[in-house]
Amino acid sequence: MASVNNISKDRKGLFITLEGGEGVGKSTQSRLLAETLEKSGFKVYLTREPGGTKGAEQLRELLLFGGANFSCYSEILLHMAARLDHVEKMIRPALAEGKIVICDRYHDSTLAYQGFGIKGGDKDALALIETLRCFINCEADATFWLDMALEKTQERLSKRGNPKDCYERQEISFHERVKQGFERIYQAEPKRIIPIDASPCEEDVQEQIYHHVKALLVRKKM
Ligand SMILES: Nc1ncnc2c1ncn2[C@@H]1O[C@H](COP(=O)(O)OP(=O)(O)OP(=O)(O)O)[C@@H](O)[C@H]1O
Ligand SMILES: Cc1cn([C@H]2C[C@H](O)[C@@H](COP(=O)(O)O)O2)c(=O)[nH]c1=O
């Protein structure tokens, strides 16, 4: 079992993020985890990024469907502006109230999509993201990285049939860089990030995740 040493001791609540490429099942698993925890009596704040506040949802619409084709550095700043609003207004208060915050995508998506997917791991882009991460200063206690073969996720997405956002419309080589980016992020922070095989059925993936969450709750004495 992966180590869960990243838990913040002075925080009342627990901050869990779910990360990974397109269609690996993050939203499905975020919802299932929230339902399971609520049934066990925990207070949960289920949210997503970009999003979670009025302003951040407006930025989501602009970034995903606005067609503005921002320069990559502007795109990083916009994702980070959405995150800061979300953290200040929703995430930090929920954690202070002792809630379990479950966030569908967070900081690792900026690193994987903008840092590795668009900028190919460029040092300046990674440094800018890191600087803003330090400024926001709200780290996840644990991150589930859902991973599976790209061909399989394409199958899932074609069945889902939602309108494609600007990232989903990118060529396969972009998604390969994003996937490799998540691998690099995991290698850099193996204590926080817990890799999950996202290829089995929903129930099996849920079981893998819940197994780790139970251990986190024990460690956090929740
Ligand atoms: N374990 C699974 N097995 C088969 N299909 C799944 C599984 N998990 C999710 N799905 C289906 O795959 C599609 C994508 O799932 P979901 O929206 O949860 O993924 P996501 O990672 O949040 O996607 P996105 O990155 O686009 O937000 C949905 O139609 C969902 O019902
Ligand atoms: C937080 C964040 C997200 N993205 C991208 C990744 C996805 O393509 C979309 C979000 O939509 P989904 O329904 O969650 O798949 O936004 C990004 O590029 N950078 C980020 O920081």
Image (cartoon, rainbow, N blue to C red):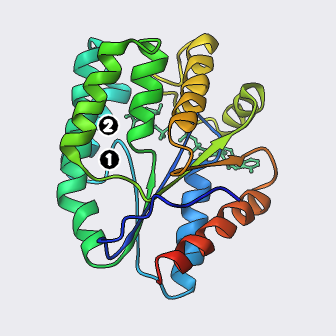
Task: Pinpoint residue 129: horizontal percent, then vertical percent.
Answer: 30, 29
Q: Is residue 158 above or below residue 56?
A: above
Q: Is residue 200 left or right of residue 101?
A: right
Q: Is residue 19 left or right of residue 126?
A: right
Q: Residue 47 appears in which quarter of the rendering?
A: bottom left
Which residue occupies 25% across, 17% down?
A: 73
Distance in Å between CA atoms under marks 2 and 1: 6 Å
Q: Is residue 45 left or right of residue 24?
A: left
Disc 1 marks which amino acid?
Gly
Q: Which mark is residue 60?
A: 2
Task: Pinpoint residue 42: horizontal percent, then vertical percent.
Answer: 46, 83
Q: Residues within 10 Å of mark 2 (few under 14, many from 20)?
A: some
Which residue occupies 79% across, 60% down?
A: 204
Which residue occupies 56% across, 74% down?
A: 35
Q: Earlier in the sequence, mark 2 or mark 1?
A: 1
Q: Can residue 68 be seen from the camera position used here?
A: no
Q: Residue furthest bottom?
A: 41
Q: Residues within 10 Å of mark 1 (few under 14, many from 20)?
A: many
Q: Is residue 128 left or right of residue 187?
A: left
* SS category of the residue bearing label 2: helix
* SS category of the residue bearing label 1: loop
Disc 2 marks which amino acid?
Arg
- Some atom of ligand 2 lies within 8 Å of the CB belonging to the residue at label 2: yes
Instruction: Give the residue at mark 1.
Output: 51
Q: Are marks 2 and 1 in contact (CB under 8 Å)?
A: yes
Q: Which mark is residue 90?
A: none
Q: Residue 130 appears in which quarter of the rendering?
A: top left
Q: Is residue 109 above or below residue 117?
A: below
Which residue occupies 24% across, 54% down?
A: 87
Task: Pinpoint residue 172: horizontal percent, then vertical percent.
Answer: 63, 14
In this rendered view, identify the residue nearer to me: 6 or 26.
6
Task: Pinpoint residue 23: horizontal percent, then vertical percent.
Answer: 63, 38
